[in-house]
Image (cartoon, helix red, strand yellow):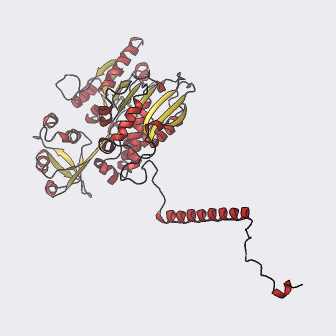
Amino acid sequence: MLNELIDHPGRYIFSSPRIDLIEERERDLKRMIAASSTAPVLRIIHGGLSRSAPVARQISEAIEEYQDDEHVILLITHEGMMSADLGDLTGWHVKIDEMPLAVVTDKVGAEAGAVYFEQSYDLDPVPGTNSSKLKVWDDAPGTRSVLRDSVVQKLVVLDKRARTTQGVYVDVQDWADLRQRGRKLQWWSAWTPLELRTAESVTIAGASYHHSILAKVTEALYPGQIKIEEVHVPGRTRQPRRIFIHYFTRGHRGSSTFWKDKGRDCLLQVGRSLETVLLGYWSGNEVVTDYFHGRLSGEKVSPKTEGTNNLMHHTSCAYIYSSKALLSDAPLIDLFGLSREDIERAREIEDIAQFVCRGDLRNPDADEDYHIYLYDLYQAQALAEYLTEHGFGTVELVPVEEAGLLDTHRPGRGRPSSEPEDPRGREEREAQKKADAAERQQRRRDRLVEAKKDAGTYRGPGRPPKMPPPEALRP
């Protein structure tokens, strides 16, 4: 995608997930421009640069400033793209690197906070619903003030989103309702590609758009209004290679909450096992990285590594990670019809795929064995399916038996959640149970028949023959 920005003059907005990736792309583009016959204007805008104007305003002003330039590239973050007013992108091509975190939801207790909400935001009721869109009062505290305030700083994301064109929606039409005991405030904000509708083109570089929360929420809000054209970008033929996915348990699923409390011993055993492995790079949830810090070999990196090319020299990695549906995801389930499995696939499995593919696995010329360490079998199977589908190599699942966790179950849990939920109805399940019971009985009868045949006491089916009358036995 970077080659297009250099080789084909035009006006481009290139959006990356993080500031460090903008800096990486800036270095790449400057190197490519130096070797090219083109000379585009390269403008970088993000919050890490010391400028007085807010990032959103800088982006809008830059679009207006370069509207008549023949060749210009603006590098911005996903957050900058979603916060700026991009109502007029005539003549601009938008390139989005990786899937943006476009949908934000939460469910919070705000009984005392109702006063803050009432003084900071007006409610614009949505007809036919029990929801309202927030409107920020002119005299409300700014986002930076909210961020610096230890009492309300947990609402900084809500405040940021409330100031964007897509806004924030809440499930209340009168702030007084929040004062009811136990009343929770449910809110959501969704940026969709429709915000870029005036652009000449919009390209998202990502392998799993249709599995993403962005795609599912966009379709729920605007069914059929966005046409997605999937384009497979051909690469060089890959050398054959083997990929080994090591997993520590098939008896339960991990989570941050579990590892902080009842699962600490499981994390201890995983850590002891990984201490014996020569790792290239590794990461996980905060509870994992805090516990493993200084104990594992290899480069400790952020759990969010999508887009980077700085890890391509490594041939092994470990990712002890969980990102499942939370209570704050209630709006995704209640309003947009997503399942907990949809959320887990879009977050946990996608994060795993992104993480493990940052290493030497990206190199199509490499043929060395690649080793990946994950927590559980479910994750390993999902990743194996992904890698096989995308032709990375021959995948083999390897249970780490020496860690002693393979069949360990979480306390107080029944069926391991790594097993897929049974999609059948109750009657169908009951019928299957009866059929299984009948099959077991038939197998038991067959074993009895074989035993009697071996003992010479078997009589065939049907009633035994009648004994002849006594007189028939007389000579």
> In the visual, does 276 lie left or right of 105?
right
In this orientation, which residue lies closer to the viewer: 399 or 357?
A: 399
Residue 400 seen by the camera: no
Residue 377 seen by the camera: yes
> In the visual, does 30 lie left or right of 116?
right
In this orientation, which residue lies closer to the viewer: 391 or 48?
A: 391
The spot of residue 406 in percent (x, y) is 45, 42
Given the current orientation, which residue lies at the most extreme front position? Answer: 475
The spot of residue 224 in percent (x, y) is 42, 47
Q: Residue at x 69, y 65 (%)?
A: 449
Q: Quadrant of residue 450?
A: bottom right
The spot of residue 65 in percent (x, y) is 26, 24
Q: Quadrant of residue 466?
A: bottom right
Q: Residue at x 29, y 26 (%)?
A: 19
Residue 438 drawn above or below residue 179: below
Q: Quadrant of the N terminus?
A: top left
In this orientation, which residue lies closer to the viewer: 50 or 341?
A: 341
The spot of residue 458 in percent (x, y) is 73, 68
Residue 189 drawn above or below residue 52: below
